[in-house]
Image (cartoon, rainbow, N blue to C red):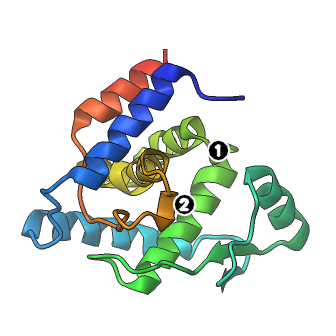
Amino acid sequence: MSESPELRRAIEAVGKEYIENQKCKADTADIQRKYEAVADTVNKLFNQIQVPVIFQEKDPYSDYEDMATTVAKEQKLRVYSGHAGHPVMSDRENLKFRAVHDWFGHLRYDVNFTTEGEFMKWFNMCDTFPIWTHNVLFAEVVGQLGAIKYLPDSFEDPRYEQKATELPPRHIHNMANILLD
């Protein structure tokens, strides 16, 4: 099923802000504190994943259905290890974030890799993280998806970079109004 034009405009607005946001705050004490809290939560959750986690260079799944089926069959969670550099989190923390994102997000809530799936995963996972980190998590999950949808060459676009930032609540409210009504 394709996205509605309204949802497509909303995710591209999120992506545009993520890419063009000149207020990337990786060096501020506030953003550092938020990412430390995210990393602490991720470490606790990572240790609760009920199958072995395998980090690999090749993207392990073609889509959500492939991930769900393969994890159920193999009883292993495979996680893409490329492009792990992050302005605040270590590579290891970022990879653990990906594993938690897949296990406690996609698989737990049975949501795919679409815009709606990523938003719903973020929305459902918010209860697991401190409330004051939710805008950072939104940037990490929905913002990055928006960036690859906004940029013509996706991750390969020279303007794409992983950021340590948070996005304004107006984007969350806009997407919630579209998806949760």
Residue positioned most to the left: 29
Residue 70, position as x, y percentages in the image: 85, 65
**In terms of depth relative to the viewer, which is nearer, 144 or 93?**
144
At x 29%, y 54%, the residue is: 19
Which residue in the protein does label 1 denote? 109
Q: Amino acid at mark 1?
A: Tyr
At x 46%, y 39%, the residue is: 123
Residue positioned most to the top: 181
The answer to whether one can see residue 131 in this image is no
Q: Callout 2: 10 Å neighbours few (<14), some, many (20+)?
A: many
Judge whether 73 appears above or below 87 on screen.
above
Q: Amino acid at mark 2?
A: His
Residue positioned most to the right: 73
Q: Could you say which quadrant of the image residue 30 lies in?
A: bottom left
Left or right: residue 117 versus residue 85 is right
Residue 175, position as x, y percentages in the image: 41, 28
Q: Label 2, label 1: how many angstroms apart (C-alpha)?
A: 11 Å
At x 37%, y 63%, the residue is: 160
Judge whether 169 appears above or below 19 on screen.
above
Left or right: residue 25 versus residue 46 is left
Residue 96, position as x, y percentages in the image: 51, 75
At x 80%, y 51%, the residue is: 65
Left or right: residue 24 versus residue 70 is left
Q: Secondary structure at mark 1?
A: helix
Q: Callout 1: 10 Å neighbours few (<14), some, many (20+)?
A: some
**In terms of depth relative to the viewer, which is nearer, 69 or 52?**
69
Left or right: residue 4 versus residue 91 is right
Q: Secondary structure at mark 2?
A: helix
Which residue in the protein does label 2 denote? 101
* Among numbered discs 2 and 1, the one appearing first in the sequence: 2
Q: Quadrant of the N terminus?
A: top right
